[in-house]
Amino acid sequence: MTKLPIGVMRIDLPEGTRDYVTCIDKGRLFTAEGILSEWIIGALLRPLEPGEAITPGNFAANSVFVDLMQGVIARRGPWVSDLIADARRLGDGTLYVLDQRTRAPQGPVREVPTEDIFGEFDVKDGQIVHGSYRPNPKHYLFSPDGFFQLGAQLEDCLLEVLAAISNPDDDSELGGSQNSVN
C-alpha cells in the first residue's frame, strides 16, 4: 500500500479552476513563485464533479514529476534493500522495477502489464550496475488499478527529494532545481 498522501487540490487560477493531483499538503504547495511543478503528479483535464472519481481518461501526467520520480529511482534504486536482494537472486540480467499496484507482483515479468513497470537496471554478478537504469516510457502514473506505488523505500526517497525541493537553501541532490506553475 502506498504511503504517499496522493490527493486532488482544486486551485482557482486567473484562467479558471484546475484540479491538480499532488502528494504535497496544500499549505506547502504554494511558494512565492507559484506552485512548484515538481510537486504536481498530474492535472485533471476537467474539474471533478462532487463525488466523481478520477479516471485514466481525465488524468494527464506531469512530465516534470515523471522525470523527477524516474531520476529518484535511477539514483537511489541501487541502494534500496529490496532491489539489492532481487539483484542477488537474479545474478546476471535485467532487474525490472515494478509498480507495486500491479496485479501480478510475484509472477513472471512477462505477466506484468507494461504500464506497471517503472524501468529496469542491468545486473552483473548479483550487483545492480550503477548508471544502467532505463525508464519505461510506457509506465502510467495512473491506471485503472489506481495511482503508482513505488514501495516504501523508494517512496521515502521520493518524499525526501520533494521536501528538499521546497527548501531553496538546501544543498541536497535536487534542492535548487525548481520550476513553478502559475
Image (spheres, rainbow, N blue to C red):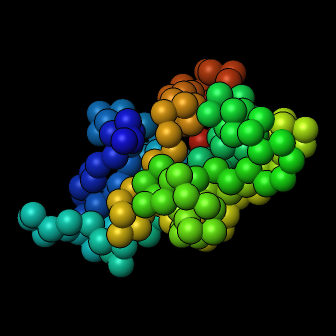
The answer to whether residue 89 is seen in the rendering is yes
Give the residue displayed 43% in from the left and 60% down from the top: 103
> Picture coordinates of residue 169 (x, y %)?
61, 21
Residue 111 quadrant: bottom right
Q: Residue furthest right?
A: 125
**Total marks drawn?**
0
Q: Quadrant of the C terminus?
A: bottom left
Up the image or down, 157 lies above or below 99; here it is above
> Picture coordinates of residue 152 (x, y %)?
48, 33
Q: Is residue 154 left or right of residue 17?
A: right
Give the residue displayed 73% in from the left and 44% down from the top: 74
Q: Residue furthest bottom?
A: 57
Residue 88 quadrant: top right
Give the residue displayed 53% in from the left and 52% down from the top: 106
Give the residue displayed 35% in from the left and 69% down from the top: 144
> Picture coordinates of residue 82 (x, y %)?
62, 33
* Closest to the observer, 169 or 101: 101
Q: Quadrant of the N terminus?
A: top left
The answer to whether residue 45 is seen in the rendering is no
Q: Residue furthest left?
A: 50
* Closest to the observer, 9 or 140: 140
* Closest to the observer, 145 or 51: 145
> Picture coordinates of residue 19 (x, y %)?
29, 61
Residue 10 quadrant: bottom left
Q: Is residue 22 left or right of residue 134?
A: left
Q: Is residue 123 left or right of residue 141?
A: right
